[in-house]
Image: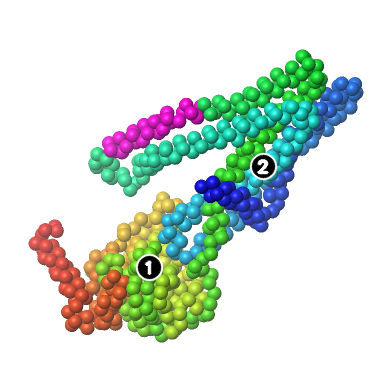
Amino acid sequence: MKEKKFKSRIRAVQNNFFALRLVWKMCPGPVVHMAIARLLYYFGWLFYSAFFMRYVINALQTGETFKAIMIFIGITVAVFASMALYNSFIQGYVAPLANASLNKQLYQKLFKKARNVELECFENSDFYDKYTLAMKNADTNLYNTVDQLFGLLFGFVASICAFIFMFKVDSFSVAFILLPIIGNFYFRILNSRIDYQRNKEMAPHNRRIDYINRIMYLKDYAKEIRLTNIFNLLKRQYTEAITGVADVTKKFVLKSAFLHWFYVMFTFTFIFEGLLIYGAYRTLVSNTMTLPQLAVLTSMMVSTTWILIGFTDSVTASFKNGLFVDYLRTFLEYEEKIPEDYDGTDPGKTIDSIEFRNVCFAYKDAPVLSNLNMKFEGGKTYALVGHNGAGKSTIIKLLLRFYDPTQGEILLNGHNIKEYNLQKYRALFATAFQDNRMFSMSVADNVTLGEDIPAEKREAIVTEALKLSGVYEKVMSLPQGINTTLTREFDDQGAVLSGGEFQKIVVSRAFARTCPVKVFDEPSSALDPIAEYQLFDNILKACKENTLLFISHRLSSVQNADHVFLLEHGQVKEEGSHRELMDRHGLYADMYQKQAENYLADKSKQKEGIWA
């Protein structure tokens, strides 16, 4: 345990220097300003107590002229005013511009990395948590990390200098420095641990409070709150959570107050009062210290205390920042398994064949596909069918190389797809996924998704794609047609479509893209049977020149496919044309018959008025 703790502290120190190198590469100028500002901060404390006070008192003792003393004070005031002006320049000009520049360059780096890592990273909760923590306020946190690092380095040097200066004034007085050290490095740390434990025990209650606060103003819950008694349950949970927070507070309040009292006493009271009593005794009783020495000693005492406090703050902040930087560093140094910028040979534009050869795949040690063998010939239509969890969507993810097979290989035109340039390989496919996402952009942008389409052709391509997906009339009924913003994330006048309409927009993306392979993953899951029939009819007509691959849970929609693969437990159980599979009277025929019976039964109930 001790070794692990030691290694984590070493890692935290390394992370701070990693942050320094990272910021230096992106904007070195502000780094220099941060270092100078921290240096001047500690120089000011040391100069005032160790030199300024000593000179003024000695000058008064030795009978220095008033003019000479005032010149020295004037120069000192001018220097400190310049330092204050410089600090204002840092805070008001350098820091904001540095944060803006850092924000731009850092997030470009983070976004590029996020774009480059494989899909698996986003489905790995541990990696995704670190990714989100790395992204949150990354620029500000990184800037503060470097600033605190300089505070730690210069604070350490200043503490040593203060120790030496006090030792020269009075060797015994350095013993009093131990008091703020104990206060800051012992009692303050103990109090921080209590704060951590208290916040940890409060976390479940605070999460509940935040959840209820969020629910009360989200429109998704508004209907249930008004139509049911759920509000009373939420109110009770809220009261219980508030009570829980109060109970945790009571649990730690005495111990926290006790340790805080010791922190204040050791950091301020004991050193201030103790050193004054010690100095007064030597000045008034033993006559071993002069009043000028006492004045310098008390001045040094104040400076040393604040230097130690600043140094302690920087130490604590540096270890805390080290954790944030660790998330950032882990993310930036992650070596992608399937980097998006992977270069390889050009696959060309012609599809002769795509073959899955003895492909196995496991997700988090759970087997999904087992010795899968499939072959798609260019220009033909293929359907993947089977129950949920059979591995259909996984096949698409492997085909698009979001993942690589655990065993076996996938071949395009006889070559392993790993040999191809990844971006050029994926450019062969137009896809419409079941788990679609809509962007807060215009309908046209949601269809083209940034494709480089000539301006004069863009409207015609979008219009045709919308017509094929069956949502053109709905889009044209919107205030600005294809230029209407979807969702109300940023536009109060934005359009919020139904689930089926959104799905048709997603399907239109595949229609709009020019490429040899079109992939549709459950394109009709939110559509009624009539709309589904029309959509599949349009898909087959529009994609007759393409290699077409689609997944559907409704077997009635796959009858016109050239070849059907029936999957079960990650294996191909049956394959052939619809007619061939029906003639076998196997699993496919059984599934088709049951679906047909259910559909006919539903129609019969509708006729009888049961579904009025």
The residue drawn where x is 14% and y is 70% is: 597
Residue under numbered circle 1:
362
Q: Residue 86: which quarter of the image? A: top right
Residue at the (49%, 35%) spot, across then down: 194
Tell me residue 258's x, y (percent).
Answer: 52, 26
Decide which of 274, 56 is in the foreground and name it.
274
Do we see residue 533 in this rendering?
no
The magenta stretch is 231-257
Q: Amino acid at mark 1?
A: Ala
Q: How is the image coloured?
A: rainbow
Residue 176 numbered tag: none
Above-or-below relation of 519 to 101? below
- Residue 327 vs 413, above or below: the answer is above
Extreme residue in the top direction? 285
Quickly name the residue at label 2: 151
Q: Residues within 10 Å of mark 1 (few under 14, many from 20)?
A: some
In the rendered image, the residue lying farthest to the front is: 2
At label 2, which amino acid type do we have?
Gly
Labelled pair 1, 2 in contact (Cβ < 8 Å): no
Label 2 secondary element: helix
Q: Position of residue 425 (x, y in %)?
A: 47, 76
The local secondary structure at tag 1 comes to strand
Overall secondary structure of the magenta section = helix
Give the left or right position of residue 493, taking residue 530 as reference.
right
Which image quarter: residue 595? Answer: bottom left
Does residue 540 show up magenta in the picture? no
Quadrant of image for the C terminus: bottom left
User: Is 244 one of the magenta-colored residues?
Assistant: yes
Instruction: Give the residue drawn at x 51%, y 61%.
Output: 114
